[in-house]
Amino acid sequence: MVNSKLVSVINVLPAGLRRRFREYVNAPFFNKHKQVIVMTNYILDNIPCKKKELLHSSRVFSHVFPGLDKDEQKLNYLSSKLLGLLNDFLAYQEYEKNEFRRKYHSIKAAHNLDINIQEKSNIRKHRLLQNQYPFQSAELYYEKYLFSKISDQIHLDKQLRVYDGNLQLQNDELDNYYFAEKLKIACDMMSRNIVIQADYHASYAIQIVTFINQIDFDLSQHPVIHIYYQIYIMLKEQDDKEYRSLRKLIDKYYHVFLPEELILIYDYAENFCIRKINNGETSYYLDFLNIYKQKLDKKLLFVNGYLAEGDYKNIVTTGVRIKDFQWTESFIHKNKNKLKPEVQQNAFMYNLAVLYFARKQYKEALQLLMKISFKDISYGVGAKTIQMQTYYELQEFEPLINLVDTFRLYVRRHRTQSEYRKKANLNMLRIVKKVAKLREKSTFISQNQYNKEIISIRNFYASTSPLSNADWIKEIIDEL
């Protein structure tokens, strides 16, 4: 039983959730089966598994049914029942998170039971929650639609032949939900089509955009629809003007979005910058960094109190690209302790080395790189790349060529890299070695031979793809 689905699922639950699950199973409202309670308590008492033999099926059975011979059928029955309770418990946790839905069901239940006083009280509470809720989302439109729907049903059941606005609200909120959700899906589809060359088709997206334009839909009253409408236009046009419009809308509406949705919205702007940078429009590095700064200011980059090392690295890389060395150095030191302890030292030294290299403090960069652990392939490749670039800038071609050879073996041996990234790194190393060897022998070969080899390297560069650090490679070839 130690490797069963039931134990595996319970084992991954956080401690707080396991405690609540125990309370759930022990509550007579949810479960009255005594053996299931005994089994649950025994499993939870021995999770996380310190001694795996404690959760062997025979040990579990003898604890639940002391004195009886093991009966596999009984044990399977209890396991199935407990797994069902676990699934219900997890569903209940999700239900509890949605206060709107709980209040909607309270109204519906009170109405079905004809408890008029409670029905009116629950309607007032739902309206109050709508007025006080600080965020906007497509889901909120749907909750308002459900509220209008039950309110209209209550009106119909009273058999009053008078106008009631809830039918109109039901229609309008459903439209708003449909517009917001369809535009959101359309943006996701267009983004994936760009990034992974997918072939998604967003049905009715064009018609929705046309409809919004034709009826003079007041987008300012609907921040969710407005934002995703603008993202859709930006993705469609791939135009700087539309990107700037999106950035203005984010500044205007950021306070009405939940953090997880705001991160998604920023990601669209960020990915636009990345595409422009990849197309050679390096002026977008400044925008890219400014987006990161806004996410930092709004605490959007912290998960469980920690800054992701990938974001830490991206921010530093962008900071040195635009040569904002003072701000970047301050960021590196200020946020070191916000990284997870297990990656903190490596990330700090690597990114400080990136800064030193950019400042042409080559010896300081090399000293830091020597201290970095290369267990992580991303740090290994990054650190060795800076080390290689530093040797080149110091014109230490012999250690550079030796490093290229060991670097090549390192890349080939690590299977965690994608084939694309591996090929890009190996192509970089081939060109660097050619350039270094030419620089090394430049003083004792003829000008004619030197020029021939330059042409050969340039042709090789032009025909080579993919290629890591292509900008730097172009620089060192141009310097020849």
Image: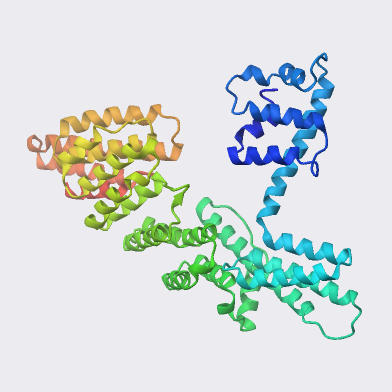
Seen in the picture, residue 396 relative to 274 is either above or below; the reply is above
Q: Quadrant of residue 144?
A: bottom right
User: Closer to the camera, 478 or 181?
Assistant: 181
Q: Position of residue 381 (x, y in %)?
A: 33, 36
**In this rendering, position of residue 216 left or right of residue 407:** right
Q: Is residue 238 left or right of residue 465?
A: right
| Residue nearest the viewer, comparing 33 with 209 | 33
Q: Is residue 427 visible?
A: no
Q: 58 left or right of 363?
A: right
Asked if residue 64 shows in the view, the reply is: yes
Residue at (32, 37) in percent of width and height: 346
Where residue 203 sits: x, y (%)? 67, 64
Coordinates of residue 55 in the picture (x, y in percent) = 67, 21
Q: Residue at x 25, y 44 (%)?
A: 352
Q: Residue furthest right?
A: 159
Nearest to the observer: residue 208 or residue 303:
303
Left or right: residue 201 versus residue 306 is right
Q: In terms of depth relative to the viewer, which is nearer, 387 or 23?
A: 23
